[in-house]
């Protein structure tokens, strides 16, 4: 019986020839990630060990992205705490201020993640990096603190589910819709502690940004991580950025999968995930007929804040205005994306439409700042979660969608299909 790519990576990092689902292993990590929210506890756990140096200052990334620019005194203190630790330990990859971006956009962009890596991050959406052929997963701050000291992590080898996508995407359909469709099929616990391996001819057609979107939301199905095969498109992306040597791992044809599902994407239209779970998916054609008024639209986050996402939004917004009494917030996910959006004229399109442009930050996604919802307000958002109170008041509502649908909803003032705007 062959092995999956995830099993091969874990075996390599744990010094074993073969691992099987359910095995408990001690594995070497290639990168440890913490952010301004999770860093303080990780650092305190590290301090409790009584050691003076981190395991490797080149393999730790600290990204101050959640409540920055600092929204209040508490967030300023958290960032100061992380900043002082980074300086003391000579952490090479420390990002704040004008260099900071949303961590899961920034690290691939900076070439800090490569195929075959084992990455842990004290943030659940670390699974984004599976789009590059890495095994990447979120952990608690305690585990991150221990890994900063030792370079090791305990793992239970997960089972793998295979998802095969065939056919050509319909107009306005993106990788966001594929993952929403999948979560709608299996549910938010459908891949609990499993690897979601995405494959098929449709995946090969997706941009790297869309692949990252899909892997990013694997956690919304309870998965340990999401992963994709490394193809020419992946290698083109990686070779421009990664400076270190790396090894590509691919699943064997006779690898063991606990479940396998196939989807014909030609039957999938743009989807909207209704409150309060990502599994509550509704076709946009049906959602548009419900006349659901919207107070705010947010386009950004580690899920859909890359340049490709902003181009989608601009395609809808160019020459149009945001509906009266609606707030449109757009946040490029990194300084590099912001710069590209400026060069391409996208920022001007957004400003002309009446959007508010924010600096790279997680901000509105977690109800942190720069777009918090009041009681009774509704938002269409390109983020990954729509739990109760996720973006603000517990009695607010969040509807998840791709950038096309989000932009169309901003123009119409209600949940809308791009076809309504572009006809």
Image: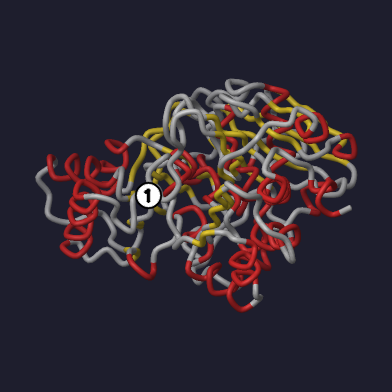
Q: Position of residue 375 (x, y in %)?
A: 45, 29
- Direction from residue 27 to residue 104 in the image, left or right: right
Q: Position of residue 176 (x, y in %)?
A: 69, 43
Judge whether 122 appears above or below 403 on screen.
Answer: above
Q: Nearer the viewer, residue 120 or 208?
A: 208
Judge whether 172 appears above or below 334 on screen.
Answer: above
Task: Say how the picture is coloured.
Answer: secondary structure
What's the residue at 89%, 34% (across, down)? 267
Image quadrant assignment for residue 64: bottom left
Residue reaching furthest front? 324
Image quadrant assignment for residue 3: top right
What's the residue at 75%, 61% (across, down)? 315
Q: Nearer the viewer, residue 420 or 230?
A: 420
What's the residue at 67%, 38% (across, down)? 197
What's the residue at 55%, 67% (across, down)? 337
As helix, strand or loop, the secondary structure at mark 1 comes to: loop
Q: How many numbered circles does the render carry?
A: 1
Q: Position of residue 151 (x, y in %)?
A: 32, 48
- Direction from residue 173 to residue 230 in the image, left or right: left
Residue reaching furthest left? 50
- Direction from residue 320 to residue 103 in the image, left or right: left
Judge whether 96 appears above or below 74 on screen.
Answer: below
Residue reaching furthest bottom? 343
Q: Nearer the viewer, residue 28 or 267?
A: 267
Where is the N terminus found, in terms of image quarters? top right
Q: Position of residue 306 (x, y in %)?
A: 60, 59
Label 1 CA crowd tier, 10 Å (few <14, some 14–19, many 20+): many
| Residue identifier under label 1 | 66
């Amino acid at each position: 019986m062959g092995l999956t790519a995830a099993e091969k990576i874990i075996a390599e990092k744990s010094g074993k020839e073969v691992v099987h689902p359910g095995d408990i292993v001690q594995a070497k990590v290639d990168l440890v990630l913490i952010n301004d929210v999770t860093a303080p506890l990780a650092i305190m756990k590290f301090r409790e060990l009584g050691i003076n140096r981190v395991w490797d200052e080149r393999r730790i990334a600290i990204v101050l992205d959640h409540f920055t620019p600092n929204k209040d005194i508490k967030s300023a203190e958290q960032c100061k705490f992380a900043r002082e630790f980074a300086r003391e330990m000579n952490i090479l990859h420390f990002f704040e201020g004008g260099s900071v971006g949303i961590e899961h956009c920034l690290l691939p962009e900076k070439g800090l993640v490569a195929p075959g890596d084992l990455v842990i991050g004290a943030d659940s959406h670390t699974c984004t990096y599976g789009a590059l052929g890495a095994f990447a997963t979120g952990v608690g701050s305690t585990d991150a603190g221990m890994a900063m000291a030792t370079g090791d992590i305990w793992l239970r080898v997960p089972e793998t589910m295979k998802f095969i996508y065939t056919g050509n995407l319909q107009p306005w359909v993106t990788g966001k819709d594929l993952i929403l469709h999948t979560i709608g099929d299996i549910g938010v616990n459908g891949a609990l502690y499993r690897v979601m391996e995405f494959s098929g001819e449709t995946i090969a057609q997706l941009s790297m940004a869309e692949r990252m979107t899909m892997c990013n939301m694997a956690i919304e199905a309870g998965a340990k991580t999401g992963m994709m095969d490394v193809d020419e498109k992946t290698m083109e992306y990686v070779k421009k950025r990664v400076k270190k040597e790396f090894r590509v791992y691919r699943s064997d044809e006779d690898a063991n999968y606990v479940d396998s599902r196939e989807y014909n994407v030609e039957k999938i239209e743009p989807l909207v995930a209704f409150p309060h779970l990502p599994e509550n998916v509704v076709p946009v054609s049906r959602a548009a007929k419900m006349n659901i008024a919207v107070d705010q639209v947010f386009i950004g986050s580690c899920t859909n804040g890359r340049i490709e996402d902003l181009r989608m939004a601009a395609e809808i917004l160019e020459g149009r205005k945001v509906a009266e009494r609606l707030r449109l917030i757009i946040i490029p996910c990194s300084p590099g994306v912001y710069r590209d959006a400026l060069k391409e004229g996208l920022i001007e399109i957004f400003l002309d439409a009446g959007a508010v442009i924010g600096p790279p930050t997680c901000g509105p996604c977690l109800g942190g700042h720069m777009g918090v919802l009041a009681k009774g307000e509704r938002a269409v958002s390109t983020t990954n979660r729509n739990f109760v109170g996720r973006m603000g008041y517990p009695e607010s509502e969040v509807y998840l969608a791709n950038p096309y649908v989000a932009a169309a909803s901003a123009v119409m003032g209600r949940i809308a299909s791009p076809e309504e705007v572009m006809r």
